[in-house]
Amino acid sequence: MPICVAVPKEHTAGERRVALVPEVAARLAKLGVKVLIEKGMGESAFFKDAAYANVEVIEDSASLYQRADVVLRVQPPTEAEIAQMKAGTVLIGFMAAHHNPERVAALRDKKITSLAVELIPRISRAQSMDALSSQAAVAGYKAVIMGADLASVFFPMLTTAAGTIRPAKVLVIGAGVAGLQAIATARRLGAVVEAYDVRSATKEQVQSLGAKFIDVEVKADGQGGYARELTAEEKQKQQAILAKHIAASHVVITTAAIPGRPSPKIISREMVEGMQPGAVIIDIAAEGGGNCELTESGKTLVHNGVTIHAPLNVPSQVPIHASEMYAKNLYNLLSPFIKEGELKLDWEDEVLIGSVLTHDGEIKHAPTRTLVEGAQK
């Protein structure tokens, strides 16, 4: 009997992305599975129920969860939603375990097999499944659009009857996927772009996009493609050099974030106060508290004439393409384990081992297990 892959509506405030788009629903149906969606599931991303072919539309989430063998989501389910799931259900989505230890405990107790897309190993074979990267690309693009909107200057050079207007200077801090997309977008808009990252390997990538790399002579390459934490001496050296570049910038975009940990503080109050009036900081690391000392997550404030904009869930502001990319990530993760309409998880698979959060009544991810069991004592 074919498995049921079910997609409920998202209820997290401000979440407009969806876990399934019509194209991917059709691809799942071709694998022989039964696809269920909750009524109106795709509407926040402008996908009407009628656009989904070969799916069954379910009126309410309770009925959907009772039939589901696999559940696809964007945001983590609530404890009430977990209670509606069948034991043994496979749940795939962002789990944000460090923010929701009580939900992880509920998944364990209900014997849900949960796969956290933010834990997918960053290996070559898993690139097509890497939801962190796909959504970071959306965030990097949108950060520049927000920066251009809030900036008090033009981005491109303009030659007018009133004279020549010089291009804006944009500084991108953090050259991961979001930062590289921000660099490319700012360059397309005509800005002069500089970029900084503590990982030495990013220099060539930054330069390949036409930006100048700021070298503070601090190398902090860490594990998994992320940066290690800087020493006090390294931070001081970093800030001394960065301060000059920040002061000269019209727009500064900060993207330095590590999943599950606070965002590093890179821009101090003194740096902000050294910026020119009318300058803008777009801090898309706000989910982890932000890269700027003055950042207030989810808010926009003005300090000493400098606008500090700290949006949350930036990919959700581009819901159609963000959803298309995310849904394809989930399909690429799930489809190798579907054989003739049946789900056969391979527990020797490197991607599956790396992304599993809970399974068979246990928390498999060691840091989360320590967090949850410690919280329960």
Image: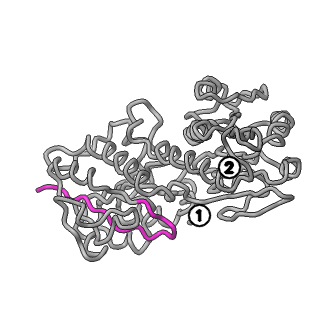
Residue 362 position, x and y percent, is 41, 55
Q: Residue at x 24, y 61 (%)?
A: 51
Q: Which residue is mark 1?
A: 375
Question: For this rendering, which residue is in front, 183 or 13?
Answer: 183
Task: List x then y, in percent, for residue 376.
Answer: 56, 66
Which residue shows up at 58% across the image and 24% down it?
208
Depth order, front residue of 155/51: 155
Q: Main secondary structure of the magenta part?
A: loop
Question: What residue type is disc 2 on?
Answer: Ser
Nearer to the camera, 51 or 126 = 51
Amino acid identity at mark 1: Ala
Residue 3 horizontal/vertical position (percent): 18, 56
Q: Answer with left or right where residue 364 lies relative to residue 303.
A: left
Q: Nearer the viewer, residue 304 or 166?
A: 166
Q: Which residue: 45% across, 32% down?
A: 123
Q: Is residue 147 above or below residue 173?
A: below
Span shown in magenta: 1-17
Furthest toward the left, the residue is: 1
Residue 328, given in percent of the width and then of the height, sits at 34, 46
Q: Is residue 232 visible?
A: no
Q: Is residue 68 visible?
A: yes
Q: Is residue 4 above or below residue 196?
A: below
Label 2: state its secondary structure. Answer: loop
Task: Work out which quarter of the rendered image holds the C terminus and state it.
Answer: bottom right
Which mark is on residue 263? Answer: 2
Of callouts 2 and 1, which one flags the residue occurring earlier in the amino acid sequence? 2
Distance from Cα at disc 2 to Cα at disc 1: 23 Å
Q: Is residue 153 left or right of residue 121?
A: right
From the image, state whether disc 2 or disc 1 is nearer to you.
2
**In-image side of 197 versus 119 (left or right):** right
